[in-house]
Amino acid sequence: MAAANSQDINIIETILKEWLEYGYKDTGLTVFDVENLHFMLLEVSWKGTERIHRIVAHVDIIDHKFWIQQDRTPTGVGVDLERAGIPKDRIVLAFYPLEHRIHGEYAPQ
């Protein structure tokens, strides 16, 4: 795995922290494994007697690309990455199968 630059790490951490503040302030937590380049926003709460524990967003940095493994945000982490100046050819929607990604506007892999 190629090392990520600190700017890429800062960008994804900032995006996930913004989502934490925006929609998951009381129920969310971020997990940043900088050494292995895994970044997540989790929702952990209770809805009555039902336990909620799910991944809202999970992004890995692999070979200088942002691999979005899971995305349950309303507008999409890919859009946030674009707004932060990341080109589409560095964003992979990994939660879709490759045969679908090759037809999209982001990098297939």
Image (cartoon, rainbow, N blue to C red):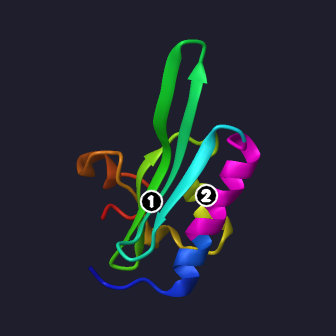
Q: Measure the alpha-carbon separation of dots 2 and 1.
A: 9 Å
Query: Which is more toward the observer, 34 or 75?
Result: 34
Element on which disc 2 rests: helix
**Lower sequence index among marks 2 and 1:** 2
Which secondary structure class fits the magenta region best? helix
Element on which disc 1 rests: strand
The range drawn in magenta is: 12-25
Please name the residue shown 54% across and 36% down the image: 44
Disc number placed over residue 16 in the picture, else none: 2
CB contact under 8 Å: marks 2 and 1 = yes
Left or right of residue 70: residue 2: left
Picture quarter with the N terminus: bottom left
Residue 64 versus residue 14 in the image, above or below: below
Residue 82 occupies quadrant = bottom right
Left or right of residue 81: residue 19: right
Residue behind mark 1: 59
Is 22 one of the magenta-colored residues? yes
Where in the figure is residue 43, as x and y percent of width and height? 55, 38
Please name the residue shown 60% across and 76% down the image: 10
Mark 2 Cα within 10 Å, few/some/many (few <14, many 20+)? Answer: many
